[in-house]
């Protein structure tokens, strides 16, 4: 199946991914076919409460939750829910599914999380446990609107859809569709979680889940402050053209995640000029030394990329690499930071914090 490539413009991160097609206005040139770059919201430390909070959503029966009928305002339009939805479909990139499953709601169908062979992120699979996984909607150039109509959803979650500006009218003709509040790349993970919680009739559960995740981040920072506080980092990858690319914005979601643990994006990269997708710079091979910091992180899509980078003598010469303060990441680990949700953040904390602490002891 052929899928388009995309590089969302705002809040980019340093992971290359495979995803669903985007609106033409969000498609950026310079991507090789099959090599896609993340677009993500800056992971703020506090969120915006969603309007129209309500009680617990139904789990197959019982009393109707309070708070309905409910109207939620969004950047692409209103979502009007006469009652708590029972049949839910997600069409966002990753985080709509994350948040629904986090709240105990298994959608009847989803657009697959295509970076993973199963179509599901490991944190989603872990949360599902033995529950039946949702049906995965396969398509090429456009959402399968006829199939979605046949499934008769009562709510379509699209807060994480980069093509929603093009698709909203068609989706709302099928069922109430939840848009992002401000922009798909600007809503914080807290905002997204609370909006979805409100739409599902689980606002109180969403509020508690958000607070629990914020507390987990704070606890990780406090526990590891002796090792991590004040340490600098860079976070890079090979872009679609095989060039070194590095994060230059502290507001990038991955950079925000790392800063919440006490780390600081190195000045040497924040001063670099942007090149290509927003929020990153291309670093010529002869300038590999600019990627040095107390901790050097690199994300790889596969073994070939890792061998290419690690086999370069200039990369090997980086002081951080020589010290052992280098942290290679697989795509799943990087995505957990880059597309933060109430499911992915705990996964990232568990997977990455021990590696960061080990690297920091060698800084």
Image: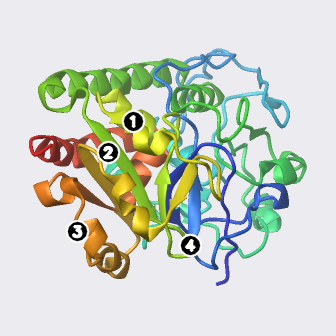
Q: Are marks 4 and 2 in contact (CB under 8 Å)?
A: no
Q: Which quadrant of the figure has residue 311?
A: bottom left
Identify the residue position indicated by label 2 in the image.
348
Q: Is residue 124 visible?
A: no
Of circles 4 and 2, which is in front? Answer: 4
- Could you say which disc has been placed on residue 316 in the image? 3
Identify the residue position indicated by label 1 in the image.
257
Q: CA distance from mark 4 to mark 3?
A: 22 Å
Disc nearer the start of the sequence (1/2)? 1
Looking at the rendered structure, the secondary structure element under dot 2 is helix
Residue 232 pos. (x, y %) = 30, 37
Q: CA distance from mark 2 to mark 3?
A: 27 Å
Q: Are marks 1 and 2 in contact (CB under 8 Å)?
A: yes
Looking at the rendered structure, the secondary structure element under dot 1 is helix
Q: Looking at the image, which residue is at 30% across and 51% down?
A: 292
Disc nearer the start of the sequence (4/1)? 4
Disc nearer the start of the sequence (4/3)? 4
Of circles 4 and 3, which is in front? Answer: 3
Residue 3 pos. (x, y %) = 67, 76
Identify the residue position indicated by label 4 in the image.
240
Q: CA distance from mark 4 to mark 1?
A: 24 Å
Is disc 2 surrounded by few (<14), some (14 to 19) or many (20+) residues within 10 Å?
A: many
Q: Which quadrant of the figure has residue 25?
A: bottom right
């Amino acid at each position: 199946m052929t899928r388009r490539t995309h590089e969302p413009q705002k809040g980019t991160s340093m992971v290359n991914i495979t995803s669903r097609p985007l609106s033409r206005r969000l498609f950026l040139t310079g991507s090789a076919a099959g090599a896609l770059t993340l677009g993500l919201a800056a992971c703020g430390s506090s969120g915006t409460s969603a309007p129209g909070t309500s009680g617990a959503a139904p789990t197959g029966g019982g009393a109707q939750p309070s708070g309905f009928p409910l109207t939620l305002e969004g950047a692409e339009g209103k979502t009007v829910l006469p009652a708590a939805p029972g049949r839910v479909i997600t069409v966002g990139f990753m985080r709509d599914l994350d948040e629904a499953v986090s709240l105990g709601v298994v959608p009847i169908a989803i657009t697959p999380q295509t970076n993973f062979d199963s179509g599901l992120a490991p944190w989603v699979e872990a949360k599902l446990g033995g529950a039946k996984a949702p049906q995965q909607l396969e398509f090429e150039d456009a959402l399968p609107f006829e199939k979605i109509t046949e499934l008769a959803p009562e709510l379509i979650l699209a807060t994480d859809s980069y093509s929603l500006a093009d698709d909203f009218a068609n989706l709302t003709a099928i069922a109430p569709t939840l848009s992002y509040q401000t922009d798909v790349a600007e809503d914080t993970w807290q905002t997204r979680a609370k909006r979805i919680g409100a739409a599902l009739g689980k606002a109180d559960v969403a509020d508690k889940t958000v607070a629990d995740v914020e507390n987990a981040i704070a606890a990780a920072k406090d526990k590891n402050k002796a090792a991590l506080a004040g340490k600098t980092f860079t976070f890079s990858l090979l872009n679609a053209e095989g060039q070194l690319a590095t994060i230059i914005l502290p507001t990038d979601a991955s950079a925000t995640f790392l800063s919440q643990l006490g780390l600081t994006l190195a000045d040497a990269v924040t001063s670099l000029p942007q090149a290509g997708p927003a929020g990153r710079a291309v670093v010529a091979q002869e300038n590999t030394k600019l990627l040095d910091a107390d901790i050097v992180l690199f994300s790889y899509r596969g073994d070939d990329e890792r061998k290419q980078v690690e086999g370069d003598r200039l990369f090997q010469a980086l002081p951080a690499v020589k010290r052992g303060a280098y942290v290679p990441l697989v795509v799943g680990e990087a995505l957990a930071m880059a597309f933060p949700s109430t499911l992915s953040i705990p996964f990232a904390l568990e997977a990455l914090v021990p590696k960061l602490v080990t690297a920091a002891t060698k800084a």
